[in-house]
Structure formats: C-alpha cells, structure tokens
Image: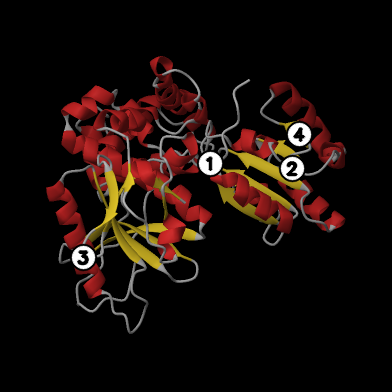
C-alpha cells in the first residue's frame, strides 16, 4: 500500500475537529478528502458505496441515529448523496454536546436550502481541500516559508532544482494524490480521466438540471484558453460559439459555470479592494482559474511538450498552478488569496491577505530576468500607491517564478522565489 503523504489539511482538520462537533471537508473529487479524513476517523459510513447508500436511504427515515452510531470522530463519506443526514448530524451534535463527533466529506457544495432544515452554523466547521501543492507532493523543497516571510524572518540564498521541463510536467500532471504516487508514464492520464468524468457524469448530477456534456466540454476548453485572465461571461460565450456550440445565451454559460463551481472544478480569484492614494477605479472582475492547472491542459488535450512549445500559454497555466499552491499555503496561515487591477493598468497577480490584516503582494512569472524586473516594478508601484495611513504596508513583496535556480532578496527588497522552494 502506498505511503500516505502528509497534507496541510491534516493540521487544519485536527484543529477544527478539536473545537467543533462536526467538520465538513469539501473540495473536488480525487483530491484526497476521504484519505485525509481516515487518518483521524475512528469509524466510517461510506455513502459513496451504492449498497451502503441504499441501506442508509431506508434507515434515514425510520432510525437516523443508527447511521450515526460508531466510534468518534465518525466519518460520513460523500454525505451529499444522502442530504437528510445533515440535519440528523446537526441534531446529534446538539444532543451530545461534545466536540470531535463527526467528519463529513463531499465533492459538491451544500444542497439547496429547502433540502436541509438548518445550515449548521455554530455546529459545523468547514475545510476546503484542493489537489496537492508542490510542497505536499514532494516537488518543492520547502526552503522558503510564507509564514516566516510574514514574520519578517530573512533567508539566505536557497537553491531550486526544478527545470522548465519539470514545471511543464507538474502543470499537466496536477496535484492529484494518486498521480503523485505512480510512474510518470501513467500519471498524466489522471487529469484526462478527471475531465472525462466531470463532463460525462458529475455535471449531470448538480443543480437538478440536465447539462449537455458537449457544452460542458466547450466551456472547460474556453476557460482553459482564458485561464489566469479577467474575461467576462460574454467573452466565454463568444469563444464557445466560435467552436460550434450552436445557439447559446449568457445565462446558460453562467449556469454551467455555477455547476462547475459547485463541483469545485472552477475556483475564480476575486478582486482585492485596498485603500489606495490614486483616484484609479479598482477593477472587480474575477480572474478565471481552475482548482488545478491540469484540468485546463487536459481540457485542451495538451501535454508538457505543448507547453514548452508555447511559452505564452505556459505562463498562464503556470500562474494557475501558482494560485493553487498559494491558496493551499494561505489556508495554513489564516489567509485568503485575491488579485488586484485598476483602471490605470496597475495589477498584481496575487494578494495573500491574512485574517490579522497583514498581507503580501505577489507577482507570478514563468521566468526570465526581464519578466522578473517587470513583476518587481509592478509590485513596488502598487506598494507605493497603498494609503498606509488607512491600512498597513505590505509585509513583503515577492515574484514567484517557475523557472529559476535560486530564491533570493533583491537590492530593492523584493523577493524572487521559485515555486519549487515555497511552502506554507
């Protein structure tokens, strides 16, 4: 049996379970939710098993407590297959009055309000899992800590051994746990299988609406072509129409995107709204992102060599990978990830804003001195524009690169950090 690779979510789960009666782990399928939950669970109800689900469907009406009996924490796997169990768990948490009772996993968001009596506020904590970051999968050496940078801890020059070919492969392989455990010859298949499953099966099961597999495929392809960019639904619709989608209105595009967000396939990056000195209008459009870059490459049928041959596209997909990793690291330090862009054209690929009010400004570049210089200039221009009388100055500025041998601090104070050196 393959050895379990530690996840950042392990620490988050232990903390949440210790303070709440129930914890919900949600995220895309195949990202490791169940395996992580099993590290802590003492008993399991597997609703992903059709036989167990059939039996449980009968019991939920006549004896819901029977389903919840077992050593705690009790794992309820793929709970959304049996929505009424949510309220049974809530009631049981109230009755027992103790933490560490249940762990739930699910690969779609909470059902509609009319399917549950109570939201679970105060009883449930939530953890969002994503595919593995490069540090979790073992490709990043973890020599530079985001947390340490926030705490002002300097580091000496660090080395990174990842090449452009490595980054291209890791972008296409993605952070799917199983793909990190098998040989390269087969690992790339995981993302293609994931996309096929989403298109042919999963999207048919959300929102109680029959979605077209062909339209879902076209939407994923359009998202991939516009990855890491702030494009409108109208632009995506136009792109889909150009690829033989027939008649299609913007509301339909929005419905498909909603379904894919509910499945945690799409995870756009919201805009950051700081206090700035200039009168520039802050753009509020989301940046388009997948929960893992391999979804986009698989949707377009791309492999590592295709990215090497098209560096512009490679740069956009690398930004998608960096956003995935930064989101995982942000979760570990009570942070959220955003992007910034204003009407003067000033932009920042990622802003990591922590709950305590501290934040970091980050640019993402595939590599190259010219691109690093451009990224550093953007960061310093934005930092100068922050109104520090109304909010703190950034804790640090960094250019995150895909291809680079060293992590170091420039003379202007901006860090240059290869993604293969980064950790939470």
Determine which residue is flagged by label 3: 412
Asked which secondary structure carries label 1, the reply is loop
* Dot 2 alpha-carbon crowd within 10 angstroms: few under 14, some 14 to 19, many 20 or more: many
Determine which residue is flagged by label 1: 27
Query: In the picture shown, does residue 181 fall above or below 413?
Result: above
Nearest to viewer (mark 2 / mark 4) = 4
Residue occupying image coordinates x 47% and y 51%: 424
Judge from the rendering whether residue 312 lies leftward or rightward of residue 77; answer left or right: left
* Dot 1 alpha-carbon crowd within 10 angstroms: few under 14, some 14 to 19, many 20 or more: many
Q: Earlier in the sequence, mark 1 or mark 4?
A: 1
Residue occupying image coordinates x 51% and y 37%: 28
Q: Please report contact status of discs 2 and 4: CB closer than 8 Å, yes or no.
A: no
Residue 350 in sight from this viewpoint: yes
Compute the Cα span from label 2 to label 4: 14 Å
Nearest to viewer (mark 3 / mark 2) = 3
Res. 4 image quadrant = top right
Work out whether residue 70 or residue 247 is closer to the camera in this orientation and state it: 70
Determine which residue is flagged by label 4: 44
Judge from the rendering whether residue 170 lies leftward or rightward of residue 38; answer left or right: left
Disc number placed over residue 35 in the picture, else none: none
Asked which secondary structure carries label 2, the reply is helix
* Dot 4 alpha-carbon crowd within 10 angstroms: few under 14, some 14 to 19, many 20 or more: many
Q: Earlier in the sequence, mark 3 or mark 2?
A: 2
């Amino acid at each position: 049996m393959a050895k379990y690779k530690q996840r950042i979510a392990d620490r988050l789960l232990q903390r949440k379970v210790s303070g709440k009666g129930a914890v919900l782990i949600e995220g895309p399928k195949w990202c490791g939710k169940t395996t992580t939950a099993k590290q802590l669970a003492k008993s399991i109800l597997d609703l992903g098993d059709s036989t167990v689900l059939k039996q449980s469907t009968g019991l939920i009406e006549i004896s819901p407590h029977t389903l919840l009996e077992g050593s705690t924490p009790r794992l309820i796997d793929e709970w959304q297959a049996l929505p009424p169990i949510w309220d049974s768990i809530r009631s049981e948490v109230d009755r027992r009055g103790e933490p560490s009772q249940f762990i739930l996993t699910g690969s779609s968001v909470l059902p509609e309000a009319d399917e549950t009596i109570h939201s679970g506020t105060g009883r449930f904590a939530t953890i969002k899992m994503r595919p593995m970051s490069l540090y979790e999968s073992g490709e990043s050496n973890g020599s530079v800590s985001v947390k340490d940078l926030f705490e002002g801890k300097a580091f000496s020059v660090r080395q990174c051994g990842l090449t452009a070919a490595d980054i291209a492969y890791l972008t296409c392989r993605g952070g799917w746990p199983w793909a990190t455990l098998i040989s390269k010859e087969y690992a790339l298949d995981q993302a293609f299988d994931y996309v096929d499953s989403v298109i042919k099966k999963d999207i048919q099961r959300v929102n109680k609406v029959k979605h077209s597999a062909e339209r879902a495929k076209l939407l994923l392809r359009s998202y991939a072509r516009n990855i890491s960019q702030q494009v409108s639904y109208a632009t995506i619709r136009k792109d889909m129409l150009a690829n033989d989608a027939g008649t299609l209105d913007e509301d339909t595009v929005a419905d498909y995107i909603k379904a894919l967000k509910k499945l945690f396939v799409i995870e756009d990056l919201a805009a950051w709204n700081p206090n700035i000195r200039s009168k520039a209008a802050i753009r509020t459009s989301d940046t388009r992102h997948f929960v893992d870059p391999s979804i986009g490459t698989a949707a377009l049928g791309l492999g590592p060599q295709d990215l090497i041959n098209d560096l512009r596209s490679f740069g956009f997909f690398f930004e998608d990978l960096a956003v995935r990793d930064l989101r995982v690291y942000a979760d570990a330090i009570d942070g959220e990830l955003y992007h910034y862009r204003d009407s003067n054209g000033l932009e920042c690929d990622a802003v990591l804003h922590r709950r305590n009010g501290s934040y970091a400004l980050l640019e993402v570049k595939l590599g190259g001195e010219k691109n690093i210089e451009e990224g550093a200039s953007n960061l310093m221009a934005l930092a100068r524009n922050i109104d520090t009388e109304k909010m703190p100055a950034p804790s640090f500025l960094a250019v995150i690169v895909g291809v680079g041998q060293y992590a170091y601090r420039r003379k202007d104070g901006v860090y240059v950090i290869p993604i293969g050196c980064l950790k939470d």
